[in-house]
Image: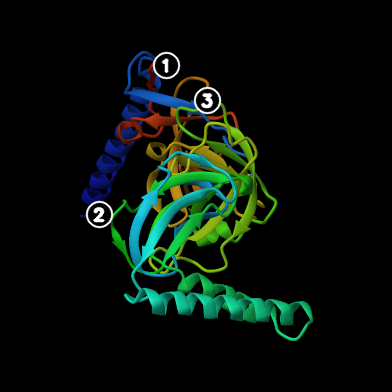
Amino acid sequence: MLQRSNFIGFLVAAALLAGCGSADGDAESAPAGEGPLVQVVEVASESAPGAVQASGLVGFKREADLAFNAPGVVATIAVDAGDIVQRGQRLATLRRTSVGSNPNEAALARANAERDLARTQELYERGFVSEARLEDARLAVERARDSSVLTAPADGVILRRRADPAQSVAANAAILSFGETGSGVVVRAPVASTSAARVRVGDAAIVRVAGLGDARSGRVARVGAQGDDSTGAFEVEIEVQNAEGLRSGMVAAVEIAALASVATENALIVPTLALLDARADQGVVFVIDAENVARRRPVRTAGVTQNGVLIVDGLAAGERVVSAGAAYVRDGEPVRIAAES
């Protein structure tokens, strides 16, 4: 019985050795020209360390809706979207509907308001009343008039016309959207909270707008103090130094040279399809050696950007990884590398 058991064990061991020898022989004798066809990329850092990438909308630093402070009927609108205007220029007029239907009563109300303004102006100059009281008196005169004039608050451009002549409007209803050209052009971009924590006012930025040629330099002017209620993102405002050709509402891609975090300070970038078996901050890539043999390599990741996956451990700059076709590759298998188109 003991001899029979030893004999069976000998056969099993022999079979295992034969199988291993056959597998090794196949791997060593595989022709170099055979194997799965893959695409490869050379590992490198494509962005400045710690760079934060986002997209946002171009706009003027100061934009506002212009409105009348009383209800009425729009009498005239002298401008349209795209018009360049000067400070103090007449933009629109309004026929008031809140002054009163009796002409005599309306005239008396205007006279009383004007007398009160003159008296308040004199007291203000003597230091007996505040500036706020003077502004109230001026507002009372304005409200007592049977018409109002809307003027440009500064040099700028009309972004949109929101009303038409003969249209009835409520008090403070938007008539025109206005952009102040002297305030400068900015890009307002939402940034995830983890990235916003590394952005500082004054950080350099690069701004790109599709169809407008070369990138433009910029600077972070403001970082939002509170995240958006629905998305949790923080608004970052980037001043654009060269605003030629930019218009309010254009979509821009920005890259902010923010402080590098410890996790991403020396990160490399690989295409998203290169990463296999991703779990938390772990994953696997196939590295191609000098003989075009694929070697399975565990790596540690630190998130995903618009350019790919950030690799913080397991790869070195200059190594080649499989960027397409990794799912069909086995460890130690020769591969065929597709020519770049």
Q: Sequence order check: which comes first, mark 2 or mark 1?
A: 2
Viewer-side label of 3, 2: 3
Q: Which corner quadrant holds the C terminus?
A: top left
The amino acid type, in three-letter code, at marker 2 is: Leu
Q: Sequence order check: which comes first, mark 3 or mark 2?
A: 2
Circle 3: element type: loop
Circle 1: element type: loop
Residue at mark 2 to residue at mark 1: CA–CA distance: 64 Å
Residue closest to the eye, 15 or 197:
197
Q: Is 257 positioned to the left or the right of 338 in the image?
A: right
Viewer-side label of 1, 3: 3
When the figure is inspected, residue 266 is found, relative to residue 227, above or below; the finding is: above
The amino acid type, in three-letter code, at marker 3 is: Gly
- Residue at image position (68%, 49%) is 203
CB within 8 Å, label 1 to label 3? no
Q: Label 2 belongs to which residue?
A: 2
Residue closest to the eye, 31 or 190:
190
Residue extending farthest right: 126
Residue closest to the eye, 233 or 211:
211
- Residue at image position (31%, 27%) is 22
Residue 313 is at least partly visible in this image: no
Q: Label 1 belongs to which residue?
A: 340
Residue 173 is at least partly visible in this image: yes
Residue 213: which numbered mark, if any?
A: 3
